[in-house]
Image (spheres, grey):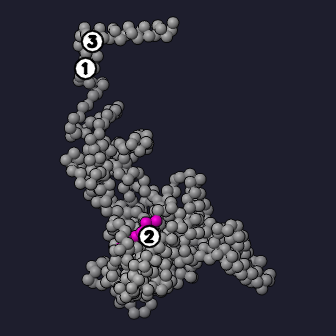
Amino acid sequence: MDSLALQLVVGNLRVTAAGIYADYLLSGLPFIFLSEDWQNSVAAHHAELWRSLPSGSSISGLTVPVPARAVARRLLHTHPALREPGAGTAAAGEWVRHCRMWEPAIAAHRPRRRIYWLSLPLETDHRRLLDTVVGRDKDTDAALAGYRARAAELIGALPGVFFPKPASAEQIWWHWNYTASRGAWHHPLPSEPHDPHASLPASAFTPVHFDAAAARLRGRRWRAARAEADVFVRAYRDADDGVPDSYQALIPLDSFPDTGIAWPRSTLFKVLDDLTAPDTTLDWTINTTFTSAESAVSTAQNVITNIRDQYRQRGRHADSDDELVRKLASGKELASELKRGSAERGANPSIVVAVGAADPQTVDSAVAQVIRAYRRQNIGARRWRGSQPTLWKAFNPGTERAAALGEFRNPTTTERFAKFVPLLASRLGNAAGVPLGMNLTSPGLRDVVLLDLLGAPGRENPANLVICGSPGRGKSHIGKLLIRSWLALGAGVHIFDPGEPREHQRALADVDDLAVIDLTDPGMCIDPLRVFSYDPTWLNLVHTVGADLDERVADVVG
């Protein structure tokens, strides 16, 4: 199994036994709950992405824990006195204490988000780069510069809206461990910036071992997968690594409806976000090969000819089988779409879903939910016995060619496949601010929503916030939390609370400089004749101003 691991990492270049890859992180696009025009624009960007990627590229959606400390740093950045490097905390002491109070509450919610990992194949013969890096090639700098230039050329052709960012060597190390121990590796993605000269040797990537259906652990000597619930693989590491066993099930999507999936409700990857639970990890990967439109049309026409031959050979029995009719209509439509534009190309994606957890029972329950959800959309997804270690290779750049992905490829066009819009952003709120709540757009992936209402005018945005909902749903509670955060930031707050319970008065009773005015029983005088005592100078001033005003009005009227 050592051949599965990386042999070398230089910057964002990954050297494997099968070739060289360049790894990048992509950003998603807002999509959910937006207008159909915007969603069509997102699909158009995805179509351009599939037209620009080189053949053999892989994009994976991985579930990443968000450390509470990272959220706390975004909270601290809200205070102006803490935005400058090396700034002291004397002026923001109360805000620092407030942020520390939030940290354990955020950690208890175990926030997670989805990241998008892109691997671009650069070269299948890795020997030259390996010789270069270990010093056996006198043109070391020139060779490395050539690979970096090739990667920059490929990534420069992609749509800029996805903001491709080179992965750092530490992030590639994280990616290997995450993939090897999915569901048991809970470390967050490292935040170290990309350094093109940073390198990691093969010894940094400790091997992973596979035990299909946990047969070795359970002492089974024959037919390890005796039931559907046994179709999984136990991935375990060497004892010195100290990484718990990971139980993973790999499910390829092997068929799609002939008529396609309804747009814009075709976000089949969001199903995994919705089904993710605190104790499960649901990931996906797309490995795509591309062909020219002419080659794809030729293949489609061969399929059409084959279907017609079958129809003719079956004679009158063919009329009772509508499968041939549906395949013939689908093949004609595919060939027609491939001929429509010069920018079109044939796409052959293979999609594999991975379910990871700390025990096989949790994996089995999650797999059943995923298959049931896709079955409702007429998407074929089933467990494949005996192939789990092979399918695992689909998520590991450098071994995807040995993952038997050719069995699950679905010929389509870039325009059609773009409608699946896998690269979506679900983050809400501002980059910094006070805690507003948890993002439940995808219930399984919780992320903290921050609100920077005080800084809105500086961003030329109106500073308005409306909180609405049914009684008893927590509107007042979130309002009090926001008020306390704003007070800790040093803002002045005026509250009008006409309710009888005076809940805000009780909730803020411990706040310094609190002034409460009850107009029904104020306990203080608000009569201006009493507030402003008799003063002849003041009266003369009022009289003078009034007289001047009368004269100006008379002039205008006259």
Q: CA distance from mark 2 to mark 1?
A: 67 Å
- Of 342 and 105, the residue lying toward us: 342
Which marked residue is nearer to the observer: mark 2 or mark 1? 2
Above or below residue 351? Residue 462 is above
Residue 62 lies in quadrant: bottom left
- Of 18 and 502, the residue lying toward us: 18
Instruction: Give the residue at mark 3.
Output: 538
Give the mark nearest the N terminus, 2 or 1. 2
Callout 3 secondary element: helix
State the mark number for residue 24.
2
Asked whether residue 275 appears in the rendered view, the answer is no
Above or below residue 482? Residue 211 is below
Q: Is residue 167 magenta?
A: yes
Callout 1 secondary element: loop
Q: CA distance from mark 3 to mark 2?
A: 73 Å
Numbered range of the magenta stretch: 164-169
Q: Position of residue 255 (x, y in %)?
A: 59, 75
Q: Callout 3 environment at 10 Å: few (<14), some (14 to 19), or many (20+)?
A: few
Q: Callout 1 environment at 10 Å: few (<14), some (14 to 19), or many (20+)?
A: few
